[in-house]
Image (cartoon, grey):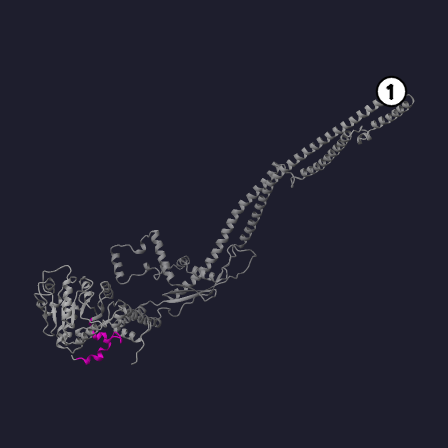
Amino acid sequence: MTVLPAMLPGQLDLRRLVTTLRRRLRLFGAVAAAVLLATILITLQATPKYTATANVMLDPRKEKVTNVQDVLSGLPADSSTVDTEVEVLKSRHLAERVVTALKLDQDPEFNPDVRAPSGLGAVTAGIKSLFGATAPDQVRLSALEQQKHQERVVDNVLRGLSIKRAGLTYVINVSYESTEAAKAATIANKFAELYLLEQLEAKFEATQQATTWLNDRLAGLRNQVLADEAAVQQYKIANNLLSASGTSLTEAEISNYNQTLAQARAQVAEDEARLNTAKQQLARGSTGEDVGEALDSPVIQQLRAQRSQVSAQVADLAGRYGERHPEMMKAKRQLSDIDAQIKAEIQRIVSNLQAKVQVSRERAGAIGGSLGGAKGTLAANSRAMVGLNELERKAEASRTLYESYLNRYKETSSQQGIEQSDARVVSKAKIPTGQSSPKVPLNLALGLLLALGSGAGAIIVAEMLDAGLATAEDVERRLETSYLGAIPLLSSVAEDSQLSPIDQVVAKPLSSFSEAFRNLRASILYSRLGEPVRIVAVTSSLPGEGKTTTSLCLGRTAALQGAKVIIVDCDLRRRTVNRLLGAEPKLGLLEILSGAATLQQAIAVDEGSGAHILPLAKSAFTPKDVFGTSAMDRLLEDLRSRYDLVILDTAPVLPVADTRVLAPKADTVVFLARWRKTPQHAIEAAFRLLAGTGSHLGGVALTQVDMKQQTKYGYGDPGYYYAEYKKYYVS
């Protein structure tokens, strides 16, 4: 046997799309037809409009009349500049100027207030005029209301404007759409014209403002220059800086003092050296005759000559008369007197040397003092020069700035009246010969595409809002659990049947309706491979999903096949089994659990199938926990030993807690969901509640399935082939 590969996740299944379209064909057709019809009506009722286009080119080139820099420079030749000018053309300011220039606020196309009333509006206006009501144009509007009114007119004008750049060129297309062809051309040309005029006005205004500002600035700078130069002169006078340099005399004086001081210090050194030499010679025992100053002294020379004569005389007398001769002694006294005179003269010479040294020192000190005074004067002049230099720099800066502004003022004044626009109109808008909208063929084509898309979107929305389950694939994919089978809606498989579902399985056991329960039983038996399934709990998430009908039909079908079956009504609040069977028993499940009756006393036998039924009788015994008792456990074990199949018809999971207590006691749980009705989130909520009980979920069975509609839900579901195999059954 060849097995076809399964569809991969996300893989397109054309047959599934086709079946979905077949199923939702009416919805698709209705939505698509409505959209297409609306498109046609809108197109036919739309007011014809005409579009005119003027071409404006940005031209950064311009004639250079004067070699002077412009106050407002021209536009740079780059892409961002073109985009900026596109936005300028779209500006409200320019639109307001167009409205004023063409008086568009009086045009009914842009100002609804001036439109002539028609229909009911005309009747209302006539009635108001009869009662003396003031016409709208006679009402005095406040400033705010006038502004809002003007803004509405500008908004209406801007709606028809389209400004686009022509590719990557410097050309801008100024297009306008209006209900009148001539008006469209006029407005487009006016936008281009006022755009160029606004550029010229901006340059003229900038030049005029610059000239005025420069003139005012020059007056202040002129006064500043005069004040700074006066401050320089006053400073020179106050600090005795008569020459440009201010310090030439003082510097020459210091130079002379330095030379004189050097000479004086040399003289001091020379005099001190002579004095020291004389003192050293005298200290060594010299008579002073060999002292340098003494050698040069004429007095010393004369005394030395006399002493030489006397010494010669003494020597002569000593040889002639001896030491004690009076002449000899007289000559010696004379020699001693001469020596004393020489010594006295030498002392006088040394004293002169000392006095000369003192004079030299005092002269050098005096010269040094004069030099210090000159240096102090120079320092004072230097400090004064710092201030003078600062004042002169300030005055020079003021004059330079003044001359710069004066030159710029002359240049700016020469530009007035020769401003040029940075753009020009290369093509004026012509009156269009054909309407630009509505474009009937294009609108119909777009309407058709929109209709198809809307129809497809409606199908998608409908499928998304369809929260119920329809096929086996829905159960297995969306709930991730086993699919046990489908219970048909009786009217969809037996249109002429007057029987109830529980009677149909007995009266017509070979019908497709009965076969559905045999299939369900087979799925239940194999829900736990390798383990016997005897006790089956039948439940659902919400009431009204066919639990009791399914339990009775399943039990009757199994009994007709020869199985020993008992159906236990476990819905304490509704007791639906009794209502479907049309009986009201005296004894039932609660009486057995309370010990008031035995199993044999409470069991009822279904005459049509032979199945046993354990109903719920009207009883005052209502314990808080019926199914969690040991009595219930013993009863279920007893039923397990007596019957092949025990069906527990339980209450829905979400409203009450009984089923959560009872479900773990069953071998498996059969969960019912009404076809296309039970919300998926309700089923998932019930699953979460059962998951915490430890019960075994055998799977999900769909109830009340319309088999005629089921064939539209895809080839993968058994119901898809119902039309092929329904003749196999005996109706």
Q: Which residues are magenta?
A: 703-729
Q: Quadrant of residue 119?
A: bottom left
Residue 549 in view: no
Residue 331 pos. (x, y %): 87, 21
Q: Look at 85% across and 27% down and name the residue there.
A: 304
Nearest the eye: 133 or 160: 160
* Residue 595 is one of the magenta-drawn residues: no
Residue 51 in view: yes
Amino acid type shown at disc 1: Met
Task: Please tell me whether residue 118 is drawn above or below residue 235 in the rendered image.
Answer: below
Task: Please tell me whether residue 457 is drawn above or below residue 622 in the rendered image.
Answer: below
Quadrant holding the N terminus: bottom left
Task: Please tell me whether residue 484 is drawn above or below residue 351 in the rendered image.
Answer: below
Residue 553 pos. (x, y %): 15, 72
Nearest the eye: 240 or 477: 477
Q: Does dot 1 land on a helix, a strand or a loop?
A: helix
| Image-based side of 40 in relation to 661, left or right | right
| Image-based side of 163 in relation to 237, left or right | left
Question: Can you identify the residue that label 1 sits on?
Answer: 329
Nearest the eye: 295 or 239: 295
Crowdedness near tag 1: few (<14), some (14–19) or many (≥20) residues, C-alpha within 10 Å: some
Quadrant holding the C terminus: bottom left
* Residue 728 is one of the magenta-drawn residues: yes
Residue 253 pos. (x, y %): 69, 37
Residue 153 pos. (x, y %): 36, 58
Q: Quadrant of residue 501?
A: bottom left
